[in-house]
Image (cartoon, rainbow, N blue to C red):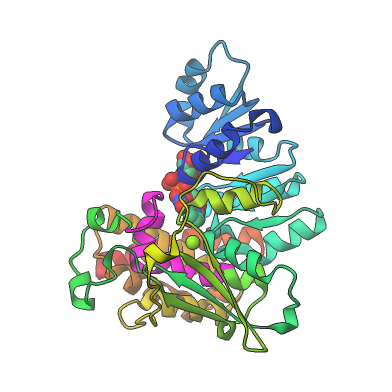
Amino acid sequence: SILGATGSIGQNTLSLISSKKDDFKVVGLTGADNIELLARSAVDFEADMVATADESKFLDLKDLLSGHNVEVCAGLSGILEVASQQTDWVMSAIVGSAGLLPGLSALEAGANVALANKESMVAAGPIMKRISEINDVRLIPVDSEHSAIAQVIRGEERESLSKIIITASGGAFRNFSKSELVSVTPDQASTHPNWAMGQRITIDSASLFNKALEIIEAKEFFNLSASEIEVVIHPESLVHAIACFQDGGMKAHLGPADMRHAIAYALHEEKRLKLSLDEINLADVGTLHFDKPDLDKYPSLKLGYEVIEQGGLAGAAFNAAKEEALDNFINYKLSFTGMADVVRATLDELNSRNELKNELVIETIMELDLLARSIAKKYVEKI
Ligand code: NAD
Ligand code: MG
């Protein structure tokens, strides 16, 4: 099943399956507003079941699929219905914290979950890991850096690892000064120099909020401390992660800036199948650059490290405040640099109200998600 089948990751996953339709049975697909694409994908891949998150589109989706043997559902309950079908592999690729409950349902139903939805690891990593252990199913990283980490540490002992370096392209505004960032627009932030992705992660790449989420995701996936995770700016986006070992050796993963590489690795249980992706010609590339990120220019990254240090519910609060700030940037209600200010103010207020000391359980995370969004909204108006 593919949760978020109409998105960038979802469609890339389907494109990998399309050449091997005899090897896969697609059980369920989910989407939100793009029901035409959802219906077309369901027909093309003979899915048993589809769900749109948008309840008002239920009848239209049913119409689009009339005459086809596909069960149609809608709303969060519909998405959860698809996510909890018996299947051996689920791609969790809904964007945002909306992906948390569906991903958990898939783990609870006994599926191995390929996790693109980094937000669920950021908000609820310990819970995701516990449910996957209890059900004896795998949680497989899909984010390119985390897939790269899994690839470079494979076969190595945990004790031999001294740190992990993940790379950031620097996004759309790599060469902008801090003061130039104040007035950039959502349109400018929505184009990425190296990767084709959904709009939200593209903007998060430009602000480095994506990298902040990814260091938290790395902590959860690989049990690392803040001091064991380093970020470097690498404009070529060819090296995705580097494992550094006690003996001074380093193993880097290089791969095309194409998510099908990481998705295929997760889909084929770490077997390396032939893919027709662009080959990297190192002689043509010539030089690879690595720079230290400027934490003054990118306060988002500093916040990410603080969230790792704090642990517990800080990840859920950070992600929710970031999502609210991003919505407001996209809607021209907040400046690009204002996003980090809003997230910082929200975390400060939640800490001063002792809201982040509660137990890390799903109910608390869901309540905190709403609270953090409402506090962030208040700061959007003030900032
Ligand atoms: P996208 O915006 O292209 O697609 C998002 C998908 O989620 C769509 O299918 C959409 O219909 C669905 N969706 C949106 N809101 C929903 C809701 N409230 N309930 C249910 N479904 C909803 O996003 P994307 O770029 O494919 O990213 C998906 C996830 O993968 C994100 O968590 C992102 O951070 C992560 N990721 C993406 C890439 C990439 O290259 N695109 C790389 C690494 C990680
Ligand atoms: Mg990534």
Q: Residue at x 25, y 69 (%)?
A: 382
Let me know if residue 68 is in the magenta part. Answer: no
- Most foreground residue, 279 or 336: 279
**In the image, which residues are magenta?**
193-217
Q: Position of residue 224 (x, y in %)?
A: 64, 78
Q: Position of residue 326 (x, y in %)?
A: 35, 59
Task: Please indicate whether residue 344 sits to the left or right of residue 382 in the image.
Answer: right
- Most foreground residue, 41 or 28: 41
User: Main SS type for the magenta part?
Assistant: helix
Looking at the picture, does residue 203 appear above or below residue 311? above
Q: Residue at x 25, y 70 (%)?
A: 383
Is residue 354 visible in this depiction of the protein? yes
Looking at the picture, does residue 83 appear above or below residue 189? above
Q: Residue at x 75, y 70 (%)?
A: 155
* Quadrant housing the N terminus: top right
Task: Please indicate whether residue 42 sits to the left or right of residue 347 in the image.
Answer: right
Looking at the picture, does residue 20 appear above or below residue 352? above
Looking at the picture, does residue 222 appear above or below residue 325? below
Q: How many marks?
A: 0
Q: Position of residue 112 (x, y in %)?
A: 72, 49
Give the residue furthest to the top.
Answer: 67
Q: Residue at x 47, y 53 (%)?
A: 279
Q: Position of residue 86 (x, y in %)?
A: 75, 37
Let me know if residue 203 is in the magenta part. Answer: yes
Is residue 95 visible in this depiction of the protein? no
